[in-house]
Image (spheres, rainbow, N blue to C red):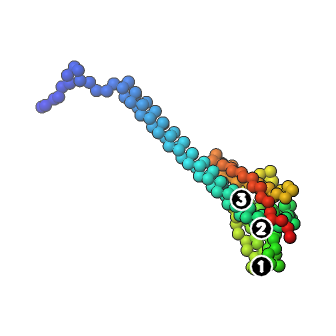
Amino acid sequence: MNIKRLHKDQRGLTIIELLVVIVLTGLITTAITTTFFQVFDMNARTANHMSALSQVQQAGKIVSQDILQTQEDMIDDSPTTGEFLKLGWTVQNSTTVVTYTLEDGELWRSESGGGAPMMTRVAEYIDSDPTKTSCDLEGDVLIFTVTATVGKGTVHEESEQRIYRVQPRPGT
């Protein structure tokens, strides 16, 4: 029978040493998990912010292009209910009318005149609150304010707002 004997200087781990190892492992695991969730949260916020920024820029670009073509006397910044902005211009005896509507967080553009009517979605996540998204004609400048909010009502909610000042072409 071969029995292995422990020498006086050979011992196993004590309970205190085991507890220290468990506590240290728990602290390291907690730190790694917290860091992971912070990175995940920041990525979600950044993605929402970039999406809101993209939608605001898209809306500003398309509306500004139409305003630049519009004649001053063909702007209606307070059209009928459901419509957001109405613009028009005449080229070679053909009148084009563009109407913007804001429905369920989406900005839509419909164009009529000179061909078949077309309706396209301009942007998503647009805030319909009149203090955040609006059009006002001040003198000869149309001020278009647009706000996009992505992740509304969540911890990752991000908003972006831009104010565009565009002067339409003079009426003829």
Say which of marks 2 and 3 sits in front. 2
Mark identifier at residue 69: 2
SS assignment at label 3: helix
Q: Which residue is mark 1?
A: 114
**Kind of residue at disc 1:** Gly
Relative vertical location of residue 76 with respect to residue 23 in this rendering, above or below: below
SS assignment at label 2: helix
Task: Name which quarter of the figure residue 140 lies in.
Answer: bottom right
**For the C terminus, which image quadrant?**
bottom right
Mark identifier at residue 60: 3
Q: Give percent across and percent down for residue 116.
A: 75, 79
Q: Residues within 10 Å of mark 1 (few under 14, many from 20)?
A: few
Q: Give percent across and percent down for residue 29.
A: 45, 37
Distance (Cα) linking label 1 and label 2: 15 Å
Relative vertical location of residue 153 with respect to residue 30 in this rendering, above or below: below
Q: Tag 3 or tag 2, which sits nearer the N-term?
A: 3
Task: Name which quarter of the figure residue 65 lies in.
Answer: bottom right
Distance (Cα) linking label 3 and label 1: 24 Å
37 and 17: which one is in front?
Answer: 37
- Side of 18 relative to 86 (left or right): left
Q: Tag 1 or tag 3, which sits nearer the N-term?
A: 3
Residue drawn at 77 percent across, 79 percent down: 114
Residue drawn at 85 percent across, 55 percent down: 138
